[in-house]
Image: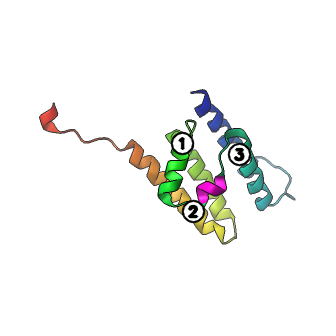
Amino acid sequence: MREVEKIGLIINAIGQRIFGGKGNLAITLEEQINDVKEMLFNGANFDIDKFLNSTVQDSNKYISSFSGFNNDNIELLANYLYQIGLSTKSDNSKNILKRHYNSLNFVISKTKPIPLNVNQI
């Protein structure tokens, strides 16, 4: 549980850093994204570039390997990826938005209720 809370705090700090408050407007979004990468790597040993540049299966496997990434934290990260993808004017924005979509689908696939077989009741 401690790892889940740690990842949650890191992801919330990321959101605050990029989208909250009235920080230094001279800091570009690209610099903020680099700070986010550093925060994730230093705080959770999570390589966002590896996550973003992998196949869907590999990125799902990668994020699953971290005990702190529960469904809520993956969804929160996906929402920040969406906001970053919309804010970024680079070629990478399309990839970031795709990873947002894939991350949400991953959470949905993990939380789908298992259909009951009437014969098992």
Location of mark 3 (residue): 41
What residue is disc 1 on?
Answer: 65
Q: Is residue 57 left or right of residue 83?
A: left
Query: Alpha carbon of mark 2 to alpha carbon of mark 3: how far?
Result: 21 Å
Farthest residue to the bottom: give it.
91
Query: Which is more toward the observer, 30 or 26?
Result: 30
Tell me residue 60's x, y (percent): 50, 51
Q: CA distance from mark 1 to mark 2?
A: 22 Å
Q: Within 10 Å of the Cα at label 3, are there few (<14), some (14-19), or many (20+) other Cα atoms?
A: few
Q: Residue at x 80, y 58 (%)?
A: 31
Which residue range is magenta in the image?
48-52
Q: Which mark is residue 97?
A: 2
Q: Is residue 111 above or below residue 90?
A: above
Q: Is residue 50 magenta?
A: yes
Q: Give the mark nearer the N terminus: 3 vs 1.
A: 3
- Residues packed near mark 1 inside 10 Å, few (<14), some (14 to 19) or many (20 plus): few
Residue 3 rendering spot, x and y as whole percentages: 61, 31
Residue at 55% across, 47% down: 63
Report the magenta stretch's main SS.
Answer: helix
Q: Is residue 71 left or right of residue 10?
A: left
